[in-house]
Image: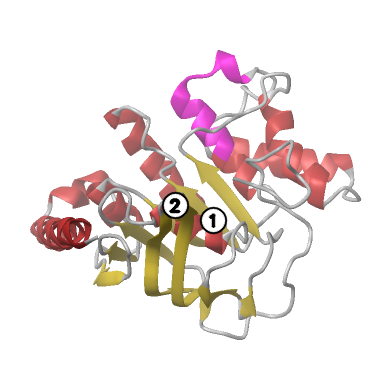
């Protein structure tokens, strides 16, 4: 998914060219009337239509919706890997036309380099965007993150020596090691078992308390979205726009037990209802295509 001079490392979105400047605006990410279609042999395939999403600075927004509604396309647009056919994507007020070092990404598949240790995998973004930083400072930064996610003592291991959940923790460290302003998560916990996934939710929650960054996460797990996010955006069926926005009212200190409260159950029920509506619209759209 990563391009722009790093074709050999497609999973590292830490390309030089940060927007810079002071944070003087309310929204870190702005999707303004974005329309996008893929060109196919049968003609254009509309994916997004007049999509509008705003992500406030240092907030966490989860995006859910029917399969194939354009959620991953949205992440590519925010990352600067694609330019929309219509509308604009802004990061910190700047229209995005190429990848930026102020963005970090983590995917469902962590894609760690087997020939590098866990520590050296985490250090990779700093080698790209902070080459002049003293090596001891790079290592201190990487080790502080590895310690935060419970991987201290595993820094010299190879990726194949770690479990799937541990590799995903290392992937999160790699995405955050260069202190990005924006973190994009594309179903990062989707391939993990339920218990490991819940452990990583709690780790992600702790990372947010320790590190200042804005997050947009794509997920199919409604419980995950309610536990982690400040807002949940439900996208409609393809071509997608933002159908519904839920404000999550669980507070900043959350535990897994909060997901079983009456408040959480009502929020989850509302999200399920809105996704069912979106799926119905998606089916009608395909019938009329």
Task: Find residue 233 and report its horizontal and vertical position in percent.
Answer: 31, 65
Q: Residue furthest front?
A: 42
Q: Which mark is residue 76?
A: 1
x then y, percent, for residue 188: 44, 41
Q: Relative to 258, is 251 above or below?
A: below
Q: Could you tell me residue 214's position as x and y percent? A: 52, 64
Residue at position x 74%, y 52% in the image:
4
Please tell me which residue is depicted at 32% across the width and 65% down the height of the picture. 240
**Which residue is at the front of the view, 216 or 173?**
216
- Report the number of numbered marks: 2
The secondary structure type at the circle numbered 2 is: helix
**Mark 1 crowd level (few <14, some 14–19, many ≥20, 10 Å Cα):** some
User: Quadrant location of residue 194?
Assistant: top left
Q: Secondary structure at mark 1?
A: helix
* Rendered image: mark on residue 233: none
Q: Judge left or right: residue 112 versus residue 268.
A: right
Image coords of residue 71 (percent x, y): 39, 55
Residue 15 falls inside the magenta stretch: no
Tell me if residue 250 can be seen: yes
Q: Nearer the viewer, residue 140 or 41?
A: 41
Marks 1 and 2 close (CB-CB < 8 Å)? yes
- Split into 4 quadrants, where in the image is the C terminus? bottom left
Q: Looking at this view, is 30 or 159 the one in front?
A: 30
Residue 268: quarter of image: bottom left
Horizontal side of 150 relative to 203 (left or right) equals: right
Is residue 133 found left or right of 149 in the rendered image?
A: right
Task: Specify the quadrant of the image occupied by residue 160.
Answer: top right
| Residue bounds of the magenta highlight | 159-171
Residue 208 seen anywhere in this rendered image of the structure? no
Label 1 vs label 2: CA separation?
A: 6 Å
Q: Residue tagged by mark 2?
A: 72
């Amino acid at each position: 998914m990563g391009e722009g001079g790093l074709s050999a490392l497609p999973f590292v979105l830490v390309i030089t060219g940060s927007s810079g400047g002071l944070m003087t605006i309310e929204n870190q990410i702005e999707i303004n009337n974005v329309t996008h279609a893929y060109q196919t042999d049968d003609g254009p395939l509309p994916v997004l239509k007049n999509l509008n999403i705003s992500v406030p600075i240092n907030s966490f927004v989860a995006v859910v919706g029917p399969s194939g509604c354009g959620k991953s396309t949205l992440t590519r647009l925010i990352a600067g890997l694609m330019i929309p056919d219509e509308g604009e994507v802004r990061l910190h007020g700047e229209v995005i036309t190429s990848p930026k070092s102020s963005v970090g990404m983590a995917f469902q598949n962590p894609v760690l380099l087997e020939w590098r240790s866990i520590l050296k995998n985490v250090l990779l973004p700093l080698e790209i965007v902070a080459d002049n930083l003293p090596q001891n400072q790079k290592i201190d930064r990487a080790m502080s993150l590895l310690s935060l996610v419970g991987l201290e003592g595993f820094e010299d291991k190879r990726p194949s020596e770690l479990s799937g959940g541990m590799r995903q923790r290392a992937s999160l460290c790699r995405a955050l090691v260069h202190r990005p302003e924006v973190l994009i998560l594309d179903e990062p916990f989707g391939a993990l078992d339920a218990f490991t996934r819940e452990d990583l939710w709690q780790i992600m929650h702790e990372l947010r308390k320790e590190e200042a960054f804005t997050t947009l996460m794509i997920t199919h797990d409604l419980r995950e979205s309610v536990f982690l996010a400040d807002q949940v955006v439900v996208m409609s069926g393809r071509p997608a726009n933002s159908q519904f926005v839920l404000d999550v009212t669980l507070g900043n200190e959350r535990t897994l037990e909060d997901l079983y409260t009456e408040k959480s159950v009502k929020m989850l029920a509302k999200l399920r209802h809105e996704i069912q509506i979106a799926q119905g619209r998606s089916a009608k759209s395909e019938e009329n295509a």
